Image (cartoon, rainbow, N blue to C red):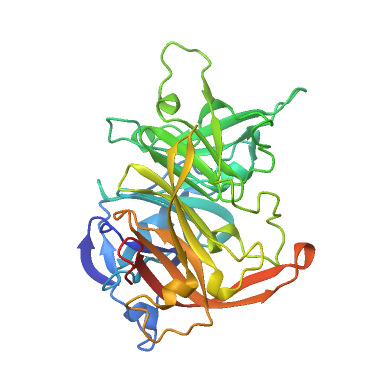
Amino acid sequence: MSGGVRATLPPGCVLDQRVRTDFNDDDQEDLIAMQPFTILRCAEKKAFGFSSQLQASAEEMVQRMDIGVHLADTPPGLSCLGLRGSSPFANIEAVDRGTIVLRTTLLHDFGHIVYLIYDAVNGSLHVIPTPQNPSWGFTGLTNRILIQRPRYCHDYALVLAGKLHVTYGGQDQDALLLWRPISSSSPPWSEVKKAMFPNKSLIDMSMFQADMAFSVNGISYWADLLRGVTYCLCDALFNNEGDDDPVVKFGFFPLPGELPGADHRRSNTRVAQPKAYRNMGVVRDSIIKFISIDGVLEHVELKDRTLTVWRLLDHDMGWKKEYELRVETLWGLDGFGDIPKDITPMYPLLSTEDHDVVYFALGEYRENSEKQRNRKFIPTQAHYLLAVNLQNKTI
């Protein structure tokens, strides 16, 4: 890594979820180490909330650690983060403004999963454990950590959703665990909020698995890319006034009705995971959009496969279709050039800065055309990353 200092990621940066950890500056043929990774400013490095047996190991790890970023020269190149002095297992869990949360393990104890939190505003790098409360139960919502900010305030909290087990009979309590860096003197995940998730007439939450979590316009969202989105008001996570036992109430809205796959089993290893063909995100800090590529859960001829973008009108009115792009149309766009025509779109992304721009990879895949139980569609290797303006039809 180079010794330069950078504060934040630039707007529109397409960031690889994987974090590079295998640096070897002494190996002149190590292509990863030779990439121009710029060290991010770390004015404070601390470990919080570990047991007495692990606190020293966590503190030693974070003190020796450097975090850096490699920025692609031009969009839509793929940028990535790098860690030196960390466990080899690391990926990005959440990014919001200048805050990045990574999931990794202790350096010499891969059995202990931890969160690394980098805050570009104050240049801090903190490491905290995953929830240690024996009553805490992980659910499909717990897969994604949320960076939550109250309105009109620069503070933030990390939020995990799950259940608290009831000791003596009764049903387990839906709950949220919070960690606020501003009150880091308190143990991580010690703040508990009771939650009330939607009833089964809307969605069976036992089947819900969050693929992503984000917040916008004072509302927090957890999105299952096969089933829909559950949400709550951000203020409810931070406001305890006037209620001795507050409950955070959640709503739900489905994905666009024409989409297949609500009954698809994620455990089916013959079909790609949802992020290979669907995604959701916030454009220009205001509009929620959903993007999908068909031909994965059902057979569609390659030339007829279609990328579709919807915009959320509101939680009650549902989605409005904005753009469609068939693969056959893509082949004829200015800029497609000599790219092979036997590869398929995969791994779509929405631009956070431009309403009309989407990103996706083109790559190889394995497929059979059989239906139902024997259906197979697996992306095998991505070769190209495209940025397409759907309004101007340009690449």
The residue nearer to you, when weighing 171 against 112, is 171
Describe residue 54's horizontal placement relative to residue 120 as left or right: right
Q: Position of residue 156 (x, y in %)?
A: 36, 37
Q: Residue at x 61, y 45 (%)?
A: 227
Q: Residue at x 64, y 42 (%)?
A: 139
In the displayed structure, 352 sits above or below 152; it is below
Q: Position of residue 366 (x, y in %)?
A: 64, 77
- Picture coordinates of residue 191, whole percent (x, y): 49, 29
Viewer-nearest residue: 43 or 348: 348
Q: Quadrant of residue 82?
A: bottom left
Which residue is at 65% across, 36% downward? 203
Left or right, 362 with respect to 70, comes to right
Q: Is residue 21 visible?
A: no
Quarter placement of the N terminus: bottom left
- Report the front residue among 295 and 238: 295
Q: Disc count in the image? A: 0
Q: Quadrant of residue 19?
A: bottom left
371 to the left or right of 355: right
Left of 252 or right of it: where is 154?
A: left
Residue 360 in sight from this viewpoint: yes
Residue drawn at (71%, 73%) of the image: 369
In which quadrant will I find the C terminus? bottom left
Location of residue 11 with respect to 48 vertically, above or below? below
Residue 363 in the image, given as x and y percentages of width and height: 51, 77
Q: Is residue 305 above or below residue 319?
A: below
Towards the viewer: 4 or 277: 277
